Amino acid sequence: MKLRSFAALAALAIGTAAGGAPVLAPPAAQLGPDVQPYVHIPAGRVAIQHLRIIDGTGAAPVEDATLLIDGPSIGAVLPPGSPVPAGYRTLDGTGETALPGLVGMHNHLYYLQRPNLDAAGHFEQPIIIPQMTFSAPRLYLANGVTTMRTTGSVEPYTDLSLKREIDAGHLVGPHLDVTSPYLEGPGAFFIQNHQITSPDDARKEVAFWAEQGVNDFKAYMHLTRAELGVAIKEAHRHGLKLTGHLCSVTYPEAVALGIDNLEHGFFVNTQLDPGKQPDKCSDGTGTPTLIKMTPGSPEANALIKLLVDHHVALTSTLPVFAQSVPLHEPLQARQMDVLTPEAKEGYLFSRNLTASRAGTPRANDFAQAYKNDLGLERQFVASGGLLMAGPDPTGNGGVIPGFGDQRELELLVEAGFTPVEAVKIATLNGATYLGLAGHIGSIAPGKNADLFIDKGNPAANINDVENVIVVFKDGVGYDSAKLIQSVKGRFGEY
Ligand SMILES: [Zn+2]
């Protein structure tokens, strides 16, 4: 009995190599009392007729299809006019579109507190990062995210426990790829972080968290090349990948060290920053490099070739950077509604401050950098690079879990990708990186029934991605509106 269940578990243990729980745990046998109230469509045999399907592969949408969901899996996508096989609960999807569940690749589970922040943007140290273990998973799932990487953890034990509770059916939320604490040297941005002091220290930290069961690693801004190199080696030794939001190490240096993924598109590459010292984070943290690196320039072409040749994936996190562009789109009322009064105030302070900088050299520089990044992300994809998506809900409070994932899709389309290309970046590409493309990331028979249904047509108008009705995870349909209602006024507190 014991042997058999172990074998079953091993067969399902996909998406992880070390001792941790797999990213895609087997569906919970039962959903507990804290999950049940949010179930809109229980698992079973469900046929949704007259549905438009954006399948996540970048293909044109299929119109008027019938989607069959068989328990935890997708049964079939039937062409228009097909009869529904016997035994299915039939729903009408007229005017609605199904998309694969988003695979969020830069999706934190925390909020960023700046103590005593005022309207002039002043705050006191230390910056503290409170966990949003209650609100964030609900906001992600409600907005279509069915799998996410935490991409840098502040309370890794909390995140690991959250994953265990979600997988067990006790709490509501997406499939979690739990990332290590930030691997960071002296100069850490927030105080709740171990500071790595040597290559051996880096190796020990990676080995420790691999054994605790994290699925992924993230390096941060103040590591030396030697420390980063050892961390990458140790992660790989455990069969795990490592990504980085870098500064002290440039993109070409990180590629040479064997990194798997780079965060924030081209925003944080410091290779051309003036005064850049080896192993030291530059003052410009990458913006000067990005201003110089216009798309199609020899420097850009060389870097993109290097990344593509070495199969280094890139994560686009446009929403967090759009916050620094003066007069960016304000948060919608539905987003403001989930913030605490203090988080609302902090967001408005920051937004006004950014607006007041419109037309200054600093703002113009940043606008140029932002524009270059959009072009470089397009060039990277056109060159065969694997681009993934995530909102990075940090910055000045204007990026919120889930809503931010939808905003990333809209900004990718503003950058020049077609809506179906943007959807692929936010779904199948992330699944591919995680080694889970056989199970999630597109709407195809046999894959997990991890998908969401929007009112409208995001293939024609990407903003329709915001109109989520129901989100299926492992074939269970969750009520989007009810989940959002349950965290009203909470984001920023818990
Ligand atoms: Zn981040």
Image (cartoon, rainbow, N blue to C red):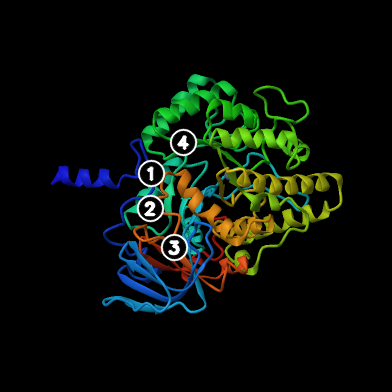
Which image quadrant shows ligand 1?
A: top right
Q: Please say if 444 is above or below 82.
A: above
Look at the numbered discs 3 and 1 and tell me whether their residues touch, using CB distance below 8 Å.
no
- Where residue 15 is drawn, which disc sits there? 1
385 with respect to 440 (left or right): right
The residue sitting at the left extreme is 1
Between circles 3 and 2, the one closer to the viewer is: 2
Viewer-proximal residue among 181 and 62? 62
**Which mark is on residue 439?**
2
Front position in the image: 364 or 332:
364
Circle 2: residue type = His
Answer yes or no: is residue 367 visible.
yes
Q: CA distance from mark 3 to mark 4?
A: 26 Å
State the SS at label 4.
strand
Disc 1 residue: CB within 8 Å of ligand 1: no
| For the residues bearing labels 2 and 4, Cβ distance under 8 angstroms | no
User: Distance between the Cα atoms at labels 3 and 2?
Assistant: 12 Å
